[in-house]
Image: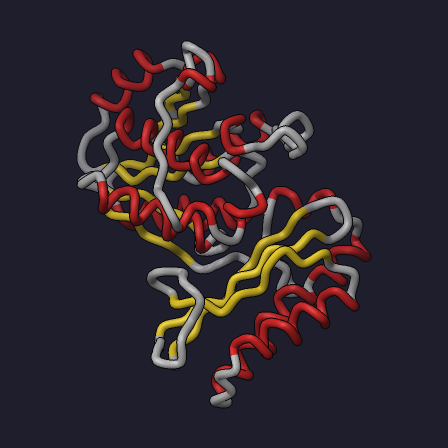
């Protein structure tokens, strides 16, 4: 595996790759969910490029940028074992050479201001800015993202479509702990006991899905009941929303392709999850 840290090195290494390229962008601290993205990427292209970069532009002032887990040496061993061809590990100075706040930013309007975007102002602007830059530098034919952050996946799809980028965006299912808790780097902030209790987030999603499948289409009632249950279990609920899966707008009775999105804090970390269904 070739490891590069700056843009001239990246461009030279990318130009030497033979055949099609699949890209997996990460912030490191790799878990089985990340590694499943790499495995899918290997099936989609001749070469796999991964990136590890904790992007400060997608963190707000009161979020955990300084304490976000960084495990680069361990991550490198995992990526080498899976046969990744090229790894890009830039610094802030490489990504934002003139400073983060003077850098051109990429905004996907509307959808970026809902759900996580409402509670994390500017978060998705940071995501799309850095992902757009990585797409331009690495020029992949395909990029792989997890469905765990379904809103992020949808926003990146829209950015690629709107900007006519010749990149196929593929998503894969959320990788879960045995309890059902969605795997996340921030799960390390939970104690073992909290991890077990945090699985209540996924259980609430399953309950809501069953309600919809039983032809209960009172979306507001389902959302409120789920919020109440989660609050009783100790979650601080930001949103629990039944949405049209394509637009992420609040679902209407005529919508058939749905996703239920939730974001909640439990103990120290903020957790997100979702579940999809077809009516």
Residue 45 in the image, given as x and y percentages of width and height: 25, 43
Is residue 18 placed above or below 13 in the rendered structure? below
Nearer the observer, 18 or 194 = 194
Nearer the observer, 171 or 155 = 155
Residue 106 in the image, given as x and y percentages of width and height: 35, 32
Is residue 62 placed above or below 110 in the rendered structure? above
Q: Is residue 112 left or right of residue 193?
A: left
Residue 120 visible, this orientation: yes
Is residue 166 placed above or below 72 in the rendered structure? below
Instruction: Tally the marks.
Output: 0
Residue drawn 23% across the image and 27% down it = 17
Residue 238 in the image, given as x and y percentages of width and height: 63, 55
The colour scheme is secondary structure
Residue drawn 47% across the image and 18% down it = 100
Residue 182 visible, this orientation: no
Q: Is residue 194 left or right of residue 83?
A: right
Nearer the observer, 16 or 168 = 168
Residue drawn 45% across the image and 32% down it = 126
Q: Quadrant of the C terminus?
A: bottom left
Q: Is residue 96 left or right of residue 228?
A: left
Residue 167 in the image, given as x and y percentages of width and height: 22, 42
Q: Quadrant of the N terminus?
A: top left
Residue drawn 36% across the image and 44% down it = 109
Q: Is residue 267 left or right of residue 125?
A: right
Nearer the observer, 235 or 172 = 235
Question: Residue 248 falls in which quadrant of the image?
Answer: bottom left
Question: Residue 74 falls in which quadrant of the image?
Answer: top right
């Amino acid at each position: 595996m070739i490891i590069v840290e700056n843009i001239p090195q990246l461009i030279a290494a990318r130009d030497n790759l033979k055949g099609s390229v699949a890209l997996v962008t990460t912030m490191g601290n790799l878990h089985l969910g990340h590694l499943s993205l790499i495995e899918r990427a290997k099936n989609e292209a001749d070469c796999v490029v991964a990136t590890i970069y904790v992007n400060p532009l997608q963190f707000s002032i009161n979020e955990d940028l300084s304490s976000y887990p960084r495990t680069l040496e361990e991550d490198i061993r995992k990526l080498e074992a899976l046969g990744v061809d090229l790894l890009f590990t830039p610094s802030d100075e490489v990504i934002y050479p003139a400073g983060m706040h003077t850098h051109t930013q990429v905004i996907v309007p509307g959808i970026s201001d809902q759900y996580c975007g409402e509670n994390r102002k500017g978060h998705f602007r940071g995501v799309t800015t850095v992902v757009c830059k990585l797409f331009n530098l690495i020029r992949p034919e395909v990029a792989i993202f997890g469905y765990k952050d379904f809103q992020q996946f949808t926003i990146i799809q829209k950015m690629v479509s709107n900007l006519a980028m010749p990149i196929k965006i593929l998503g894969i299912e959320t990788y879960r702990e045995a309890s059902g808790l969605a795997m996340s780097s921030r799960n390390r902030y939970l104690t073992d006991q909290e991890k077990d209790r945090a699985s209540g987030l996924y259980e609430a999603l399953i309950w809501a899905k069953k309600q919809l499948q039983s032809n209960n289409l009172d979306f507001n009632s389902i959302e409120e009941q789920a919020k109440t249950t989660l609050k009783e279990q100790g979650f601080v609920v930001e949103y629990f929303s039944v949405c049209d899966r394509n637009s992420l707008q609040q679902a209407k009775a005529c919508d058939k392709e749905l996703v239920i999105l939730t974001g909640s804090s439990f103990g120290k970390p903020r957790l997100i999850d979702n579940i999809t269904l077809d009516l």
